[in-house]
Image: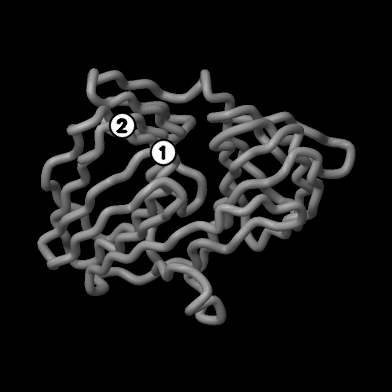
Amino acid sequence: MIKHVPFQSLGKANHGWLKANHHFSFAHYYNPSRMQFGTLRVINDDWVAPGKGFPPHPHNNMEIITFVRSGSVTHEDNAGNKGVTEKGEVQIMSAGTGIVHSEYNRSKDPLTLYQIWIEPNERNVSPRWDSKKIPDSLNDNALSLLVSGYSEDKGKALFIHQKARIFGGKVSEGSRFDHGITDQAYVLVSSGCVEIVSGDKNITLNKGDGAEVTNLLSIQIHALEESELLVIDAP
């Protein structure tokens, strides 16, 4: 089954310096039919003005993944981690026993990002932070593995404490390829337009759209134009 989640249907919040679009209930946006998708608890599609950001605040027992779509985000936490994650990079933070961090757009350009929260399969781990550059070349037959909680993927992807994988990257116009699914998947289109196909079912996803994929072993991804997308495969 493939369920289309149009960008227009997302929860909205406009704080001036922050424009947020929520795929699931978050902060002041509450929708009992959109609480989470398995262990996938949060997907926020955010726009942050230059010089603005999120002051120090705490998290615990959550795997937090940030995919930077444009601009850059400056991270600092009370575990001593500091770093700047730029366009085309992904960062992870295992909150574990508890961590206080801040995230700011220190650049002169707007910051756009996806922030993704996945519930961990191991609680009270030591907090950690890491980042990775996403290959920026166009792909015709696969998405790159960016994040994984599987031991066999260590060294190939950023590690999180959950049996989940996140794939992403840019695909060229006209490319068509199969993508296998281990559990269930959430597809995000960062830019462009793609068609998700399974059997005789096909759904077109435009920029900002999402799709829930359940009870399928694979989907076919067809790029109707040059596009960038993420596939989150989690229990």
Q: Residue at x 42, y 70 (%)?
A: 159
Q: Amino acid at mark 1?
A: Ser
**In x, y percent, where is residue 73?**
28, 46
Coloring applied to the structure: one colour
Please give left or right for residue 23 compared with residue 79 in the image: right
Please give left or right for residue 234 compared with residue 20 in the image: right
Nearer the observer, 33 or 40: 40
If you read the primary sequence from the N terminus, does the residue marked by circle 2 or circle 1 appear first?
1
Furthest residue to the front?
Answer: 108
**In x, y percent, where is residue 24?**
43, 35
* Quarter placement of the C terminus: bottom right
**In x, y percent, where is residue 170?**
62, 47
- Which image quadrant is residue 193 in? top right
Residue, disc 1? 70
Residue 157 makes an appearance in the image? yes
Mark 1 element type? strand
Mark 2 element type? loop
For the residues labelled 2 and 1, the Cα–Cα distance comes to: 8 Å
Looking at the image, residue 131 lies above or below residue 22: below
Evaluate if marks 2 and 1 touch, with contact meaning CB atoms under 8 Å apart.
yes
Binning the other alpha carbons within 10 Å of mark 2 as few (below 14), some (14 to 19) or many (20 upward) gives: some
Nearer the observer, 85 or 93: 85
Please give left or right for residue 226 compared with residue 81 in the image: right
Looking at the image, residue 103 lies above or below residue 17: below
Q: Residue at x 75, y 45 (%)?
A: 221
Binning the other alpha carbons within 10 Å of mark 1 as few (below 14), some (14 to 19) or many (20 upward) gives: some
Q: Amino acid at mark 2?
A: Asp
* Quarter placement of the N terminus: top right
Residue 233 makes an appearance in the image? no
Check residue 109 in the rendering and tell me which mark sits there, or answer none. 2
**In x, y percent, where is residue 40?**
46, 50
